[in-house]
Image: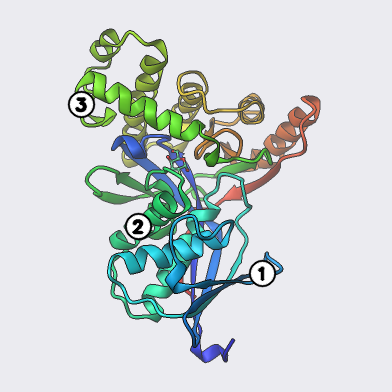
């Protein structure tokens, strides 16, 4: 790689979603914060006609001929790099041979958006280095296309939006239908609170088909109800009465009540009352994801129950589920006690020890 003066370095963060789970692909609302952990991408020019991707986490770099960039041609971590270049070129941006070097500290498989952080770091670094002039909204489309069309995981836009649009000290309220958004101040420190992240270390994998099945359930329910997306269900009782499939009824109930909980959460944050008042909404979200949407796991349930038992104001799984991480809103002074209670509960349940850390609402993707 050439000297440092030629480097374009961008860092894009992982995220936790405060509330609004499995609502993004139903045209609904989400409320994520960016984490201090992230992925840094450095871009340099190179001669020839191939892309070179290297990562400090991997032994070998991967070289990908630009002419061979197509879905299925690259596997593993390098697919997220290749997919961003593929999506940029597909929409007419001229991306020549470059070297992209990655470094990161988002725990992999923890449901904290390590792949979106990687995609967004690569996209913002290339946008800057090649002077592509693309707006953040376009970069969300590019990175989501990488994930959906190149890597082949049918996610919504929550993770990429969080990584690209979040600001320090705030949660991002995003309407996934209109793209309308607003920063909602979230000064946990001043409120004497802490948001704990419990990485259950039970690998979260969206590629196993369960995520796609939830999406298919929602699409089918919307079709039977005659609405564009479940976001459009305004009378939940009437909608439930029209569906005779119990599984679809539960999926609909989760999405509709979850959207309402996001808006309630924001209303409580807006009204200047105690931030801790959002706790019961977080816990209700978990119950809904566990019972109606069926995306929780034993580890996530143990984490949530132990945190609540130790005095957390609210707790829930965050992200896609099926493993990954939970969050707990606690009095800052109780952080150690809640952490110890969660660790004890994992040990008592015969589970491997979780990793617990504090989430601080941090900046979205930026040049470093
Ligand atoms: C994963 C997906 F990538 C997001 O798009 C979102 O659907 C989330 O699961 C659930 O809210 O993180």
| Residue 56: mark in rendering | 1
Residue at the outermost front position? 68
Q: Which residue is mark 2?
A: 140
Up-down: is 338 above or below 157? above
For label 1, the SS is loop
Q: Which is nearer the eye, 223 or 5?
A: 223
Q: CA distance from mark 1 to mark 3?
A: 47 Å
Q: Is residue 353 visible?
A: yes
Q: Quadrant of ligand 1?
A: top left
In the rendered image, residue 49, in percent from the top left (x then y), is placed at 47, 81
Q: Residue at x 40, y 58 (%)?
A: 143
In the rendered image, residue 84, in percent from the top left (x then y), is placed at 42, 63
Q: Quadrant of residue 195?
A: top right
Q: Residue at x 46, y 27 (%)?
A: 285
Up-down: is 69 above or below 268? below
For label 3, the SS is loop
Q: Which residue is mark 3?
A: 227
In the rendered image, residue 336, in percent from the top left (x then y), is placed at 71, 41
């Amino acid at each position: 790689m050439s000297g440092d003066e030629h480097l374009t370095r961008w860092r894009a963060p992982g995220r936790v979603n405060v509330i609004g789970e499995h609502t993004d692909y139903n045209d609904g609302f989400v409320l994520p914060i960016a984490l201090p952990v992230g992925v840094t991408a450095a871009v340099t020019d190179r001669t020839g006609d191939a892309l070179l991707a290297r990562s400090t986490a991997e032994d070998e770099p991967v070289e990908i001929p630009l002419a061979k960039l197509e879905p299925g041609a690259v596997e593993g971590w390098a697919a997220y790099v290749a997919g961003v270049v593929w999506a940029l070129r597909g929409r007419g941006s001229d991306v020549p041979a470059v070297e992209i070097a990655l470094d990161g500290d988002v725990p992999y498989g923890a449901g904290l958006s390590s792949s979106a952080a990687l995609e967004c770091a690569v996209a913002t670094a290339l946008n800057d280095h090649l002077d592509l002039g693309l707006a953040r909204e376009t970069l969300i489309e590019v990175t989501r296309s990488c994930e959906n069309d190149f890597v082949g995981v049918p996610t919504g836009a929550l993770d990429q939006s969080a990584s690209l649009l979040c600001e320090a000290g705030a949660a991002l309220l995003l309407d996934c239908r209109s793209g309308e958004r607003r920063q909602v101040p979230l000064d946990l420190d001043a409120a004497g609170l802490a948001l704990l992240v419990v990485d259950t270390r039970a690998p979260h994998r969206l590629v196993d088909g369960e995520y796609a099945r939830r999406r298919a359930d929602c699409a089918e329910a919307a079709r039977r109800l005659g609405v564009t997306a479940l976001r459009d269900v305004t009378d939940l009782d009437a909608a439930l009465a029209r569906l005779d499939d119990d599984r679809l009824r539960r999926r609909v109930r989760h999405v509709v009540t979850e959207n309402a909980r996001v808006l309630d959460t924001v209303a409580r944050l807006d009204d200047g009352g105690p931030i801790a008042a959002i706790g019961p909404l977080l816990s209700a979200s978990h119950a809904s994801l566990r019972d109606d949407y069926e995306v929780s796991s034993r580890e996530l349930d143990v984490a949530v129950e132990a945190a609540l038992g130790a005095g957390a104001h609210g707790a829930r799984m965050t992200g896609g589920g099926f493993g990954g991480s939970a969050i707990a809103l606690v009095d800052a002074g109780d952080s150690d006690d809640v952490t110890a209670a969660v660790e004890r509960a994992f040990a008592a349940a015969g589970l491997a020890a979780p990793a617990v850390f504090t989430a601080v609402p941090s900046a979205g993707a930026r040049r470093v």
